[in-house]
Image: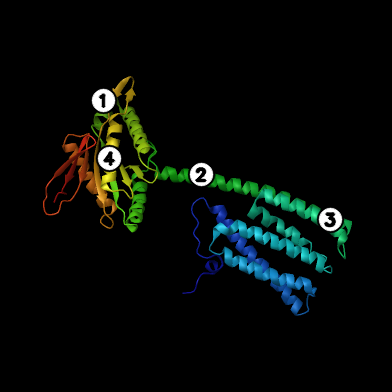
Amino acid sequence: MRAHPSRLLFGSTPFGEGQEYLSFQYRFLIVVLIAGALATTVFLLGESTRLNRIDSPHVVSMAAFTVASLLLWGVLRGRPAAVRPVAWLYLGLCQLEYLSALVHVPQDEMRALWFLTNVPGVYLLLGRRTGAVVTALTVVGLAWINPRLSVPYSPNALATLLVGIVYQAIFFHVYSARSISYLQQVHGLNRQLHDLADRDPLTGLLNARAYYAGCEQALAAAACEGRSSTVLFVDLDHFKRINDTRGHAAGDEVLRRVAGCLREQVRHSDWIGRIGGEEFSLLLPRTSTEEALPLAERLRVSLEALQIEIDGQPIPVTASIGVATARPGEHTMASLQQQADEAMYQAKARGRNRVSMLEVKPGTGARVEREAQGTVFTALTPHG
């Protein structure tokens, strides 16, 4: 199967969300490197066929520039993190190449235009501050070296050249500033759209779709490392009674407070989502049962300790929590959530406001109870 031309040029480098400008810089620099090598190759062919005579010192310079450009392409291809160092190296090569043409090819009246073409690339690849500095150094350098050339430019030609460089620098200074600002705004809007699509608007937690999608990936990653993962299924007790007696506004406030409490208790690597009206699920990647049960108990105690008042009247909150642990390669997120769901219903059946764990006891079918941190964890055999 023949590779796509763009893949030959740029490699198969993936760019994540928010890396749009880096992707542009990476591709732009590769195109510039190859275009620069091709341009000097054309001049070398012209010299070899005597169509475009060039003094030998600059022929050596062009040959070295061509090889160096292709080597830099090889360094950059597949390595977007190398954009800035490669861009700096290429800037230095270009300045030396243009200076060589200025000194060694006096018969070419247009050779100083190469300094003009350098300005856009510097602004786009290295930023406005570097672009302004390079522009200033170029203008000062050309003004200083011109009277020392074997065939200097006339004052009018030099003035036109320098003003043209400054004008182009101002243009790209404004253009690059507006382009980056536009990309940042687009990225921010995209993030807002993603948040609207992935987040529950009431609690700010992941909605069921986004939660389960992320959990599948986290489970797979933990399984590849040979690590267990645990799900905590949190269901608020008697939540319908709150809505019926205190109103839906009170119920919404309870849900927001519960979501904040859960968020404060978990790690940044854990996944938490609102998957139903008063149902919350937490995936703890790379977490064993022994590590998850104390956290589940802390969550239960923290929820029970919430002090929620509506119109001066307290609203008590408790939760039943089901726990299920996936050994590497044993569960999908759907089956793990189902087991945690069953354990949660067992917690409700045993009086609510408790933590229950579902555990298979091969060959016995017995229920084993063990006490830890003030609650009874019930090890249950799945039904059926």
Q: Does residue 168 appear anywhere in the picture?
A: no
| Crowd class of label 4 (few under 14; some 14 to 19; many from 20; radius 10 Å) | some
Q: Residues within 10 Å of mark 3 (few under 14, many from 20)?
A: few
- Disc 1 residue type (three-letter): Thr
In this rendering, is residue 65 above or below 203? below
- Residue 84 showing in the rendered view: yes
Looking at the image, tell me whether mark 2 or mark 1 is earlier in sequence order.
2
Identified by mark 2, the residue type is: Leu
Label 2 – label 1 distance at C-alpha: 40 Å
Read off the residue under disc 1: 245
Q: Nearer the viewer, residue 215 or 90?
A: 90
Residue matched to label 4: 294
Q: Which residue is mark 3?
A: 144
Looking at the image, tell me whether mark 4 or mark 3 is earlier in sequence order. 3
Q: What mark, if any, has residue 151 been given in the picture? A: none
Residue 189: which disc? 2
Residue type, numbered disc 3 = Trp
Q: Given this view, does label 1 or label 3 mark the residue nearer the observer?
A: 3
Gap between marks 1 and 4 measured at Cα = 33 Å
Q: CA distance from mark 1 to mark 3?
A: 86 Å
**Residue 113, quarter of picture:** bottom right
Amino acid at pointer 4: Pro
Nearer the observer: mark 2 or 4; the answer is: 4
Marks 4/3: CA–CA distance: 75 Å
